[in-house]
Image (cartoon, rainbow, N blue to C red):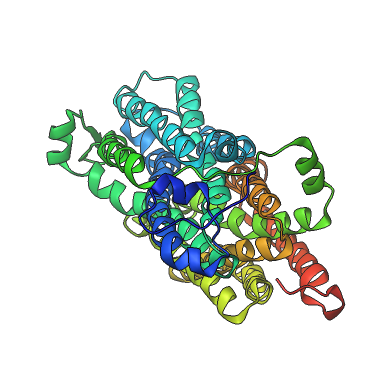
Amino acid sequence: MSELKMPQVGASRSEIVANWQPENPEFWEKFGKKIAKQNLVISTIALTLSFCVWYLWATIAAQLNGAGFNFTTDQLFTLAALPGLVGATLRFVYTYMPALIGGKNWTFISTLILLVPVVWLGFAVQDTTTSYTTFMILTALIGLAGANFSSSMAYIGNFFPKSEKGTALGINGGVGNLGISVIYFLAPFAMGSAALGSVFGVTPAIIKGNAVYLANAAFMWVVPLVVILALMTRFMDNLPLEKPNPKNLVQIFGNKHTWALTLLYTCSFGAFSGYAAALGLLVGKEFPEVPFASIAFVGPLVAGALRPVGGWLSDKINSGTKVTFVSLIGLCATTALIAVGVDMHNFPFFFAMSVLTFVCCGFATGATFRMIPHVFGNPLLSSLITGFVAAVAAYGAFITPKIFGFVYSTFGNIHPAFAVLLAFNLVTVAVCFWFYVRKSANMNA
């Protein structure tokens, strides 16, 4: 990369971006801050919409059989898990795309693609002859939305100085994660709106005597997606990033901290995304008498809202490690207590522990991402590892629903699933302590 120079007053936006140097205080105050914040705002909105699309299926799945479809419990859990599998797997690819073709370019392309499954799903849920195979293809395409997290997080941090990365990544990831809460909150209203159904030309299904417009939950995202695509062309930029090469990958995979941080983030974000994907179906199995759809948004809302707080708190006390460690211990406790709530068949207790689980996940996800640029000082490696860690962790959105579905079909109750999750959480706490908490680790992340 060519040597950077200080832009002059009145320099064009392209010239400023071509000489991006956020660690230079003069550049940051005069030129960088405004552009960085504009990119952060648009990136965050785009990521929020991506999460809305990624969890779109989870809001529809529990209603499907009531609308005239005939899928087994295992099939429904599989369909709920498939977007997580696709999203997680493609995150490995999406991580490198901003550096290869430009962050603005890739954000536009990856968001534009989402219009395909959104529109297709709206038509598919109105036709009860739509096959299980077709829904598998649809949910796989929906999974593309989940991959956007890696490219977004790997890219947006490059706009900010190291002292502000934790807060910026926390905002981008945290508000983006709120998309799960947004879709859970809006979908029930949309599916119950005859007026919206009339606008979209949706044929309602009659479920328990009520007209339900399932397709509204999909069609409602078309306009927001188109609007954010237009805003990207005006307020996003392609930073001149160093291109990744095989040597970079060797450096990543050969470093023990890559795997340690991946485990920490998988435990926190994996629990968040997986539990959010499976919670509606889990409540339907364990508490069928509870009208859960109206409050399904609460847990994801809490987790998404607290993620920026986790990043900010980590910056404030200069330690993402401490916030992560305490949050993971809390996650162990709440995982065990959720199982107790199921055993007692006490929904208020079960739901309270579920919300506390999301609280712990929110703090931990923000704090763990703050750790990465402090463990890895090289900006390129930090960016690539951010994307890689996010990719692996996203498998939680696939694995957790599949574990629940397998345990139900094999054991007839959910307790073995929570035992497995608790064991994983305890291992993660031990890894966090060994690599980052104990004094002899000599880490200040």
| Residue sitting at the far right | 440
Q: How many marks?
A: 0
> Where residue 330 appears, x then y in whole percent?
62, 73
Q: Is residue 238 left or right of residue 93?
A: left
Residue 207 in sight in this render: no
Q: Give the quadrant of the N terminus.
A: top right
> Where residue 433 appears, x then y in whole percent?
78, 72
Front position in the image: 163 or 427: 163
At 36% from the left and 32% from the top, the residue drawn is 118
Where is residue 338, by image quadrant?
Answer: bottom right
| Residue sitting at the far front | 8
At 44% from the left and 32% from the top, the residue drawn is 109
Residue 402 in sight in this render: yes
Above or below: residue 140 compared with residue 263: above
Above or below: residue 219 compared with residue 38: above
Front position in the image: 196 or 344: 196
Front position in the image: 403 or 290: 403
Q: Is residue 262 left or right of residue 346?
A: right
> Where residue 115 appears, x then y in whole percent?
36, 30
At 59% from the left and 56% from the top, the residue drawn is 269
At 27% from the left and 34% from the top, the residue drawn is 219
> Where residue 378 appears, x then y in whole percent?
71, 56
Above or below: residue 129 compared with residue 406: above
Q: Give the quadrant of the C terminus.
A: bottom right
